Image: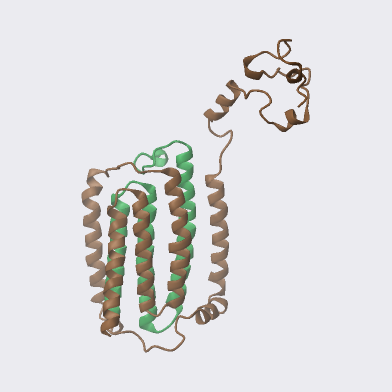
Amino acid sequence: MVFTAILFFIAAIGAITGAVGVVLLRNPFYSVLALAFHLVSLAALFLLLRAEFVAAAQVVVYAGAVMVLYVFVVAYVGGGEQLASGAVLRVLGPLFALALAVELCIAMLGAGLKGVSSDGAPFIPGFGTPAHIGTLFLTTYLFPFELASILLLIAAVGAVVLARRRRGLEPDEQVAVRIEAPRPAYTGTMAEAAGVRPRPGDEPFKPDGEPVGTTTGDPVRQQGGW
Amino acid sequence: MAIGWYLTVSALIFCIGAGGVLVRRNPLVILLCLELMLNGANLSLVSFARMWGGEDGQIFALIVMVVAAAEVTVGLGLVVAIYRRHLPIDVDELNELQG
């Protein structure tokens, strides 16, 4: 019992420290690392609550996959700028959080439930193992299980649609740059490699600012026959 | 340990997350604070599952994790789209939908 209590306090302090770190650290990258620490501590709490499968899923899915996604996006976006929050919310936000904490503690601890002050139901061997969870998922909770898979599919498609590169919807300055400054000739399109000649109506391609069709260049370049 | 301790920890985590959502302005950090709130709810669900002696609460927690993963995917896609349009990564500046 003492051992369990020590483990609980270590994990709980770790989880709360990680949560505070997420909110207080200025750099989003450090916030992500603090959240990973928080998730691992929370997995320890889940293990103390005999939820083995949930703890394993927490470490593998959350602290593994989701955090990697976060790290990639933080590395892509950067976002290390120092953002000071609005003056009103800066004061009201913590006050609201404190009031909510007091209210939740009163609601949960003062509810008078007998179970809240007990150590929980007597432990049955096999409680929370993957076998039990899997049986429940494939029998009683089959519909939520299938719904979750559809939800994940929709989320993946939605993320790809949201984050894709849009052409034609917004002005893209890269296109203007490319049109104004064409590549020098013979820098590697397949048409040039295959020796395709420009059609009569086409705008002549200008290699290095030198007009095509003058006889000053070397003959091989004019033929385009590499 | 009594279940009440776990519930207290979950309430604290939830409230830290709620305060973070209100205080921070970077959408990435707001998403992280949403994760905190979901994890606080998860901890209380698992605690109640332990208290009751049934695994249904753990099923709930796993479904919450799935929903959180989906939410993060779409949210990070939005952040990347905002970044691509060279808009400021700041929820106070992004007020085009204000009406």
Q: Image point 25% across, 76% down: which residue? A: A109
Q: Position of residue A122 (x, y in %)?
A: 37, 89
Q: Image quadrant of residue A203?
A: top right
Q: In this rendering, is residue A32 above or below A107?
A: above
Would residue A1 be found to the left or right of residue A204 on screen? left
Of all chains in the rendering, the one displayed in brown is A
Q: In this rendering, is residue A64 above or below A139?
A: above
Q: Position of residue A208 (x, y in %)?
A: 63, 18
Would residue A186 be found to the left or right of residue B67 on screen? right
- Using the rendered image of the protein, determine whether residue A212 is visible from the camera's viewpoint: yes
Between B98 and B73, the one lying in front of the other is: B73
- Using the rendered image of the protein, determine whether residue B37 is visible from the camera's viewpoint: no
- Farthest-out residue, top: A215
For the C terminus of chain B, the quadrant is top left
Between A169 and A186, the one lying in front of the other is: A186
Q: Image point 62% across, 23% down: which residue? A: A182
Of all chains in the rendering, the one displayed in green is B
For the N terminus of chain B, the quadrant is bottom left
Q: Position of residue A127 (x, y in %)?
A: 44, 84
Q: In this rendering, is residue A211 above or below A197?
A: above
Q: In this rendering, is residue A169 above or below B79?
A: above
Q: Image quadrant of residue A58?
A: bottom left
Q: Image point 44% across, 88% down: which residue? A: A125
Q: Image point 32% across, 53% down: which residue? A: B21
Between B11 and A163, the one lying in front of the other is: A163
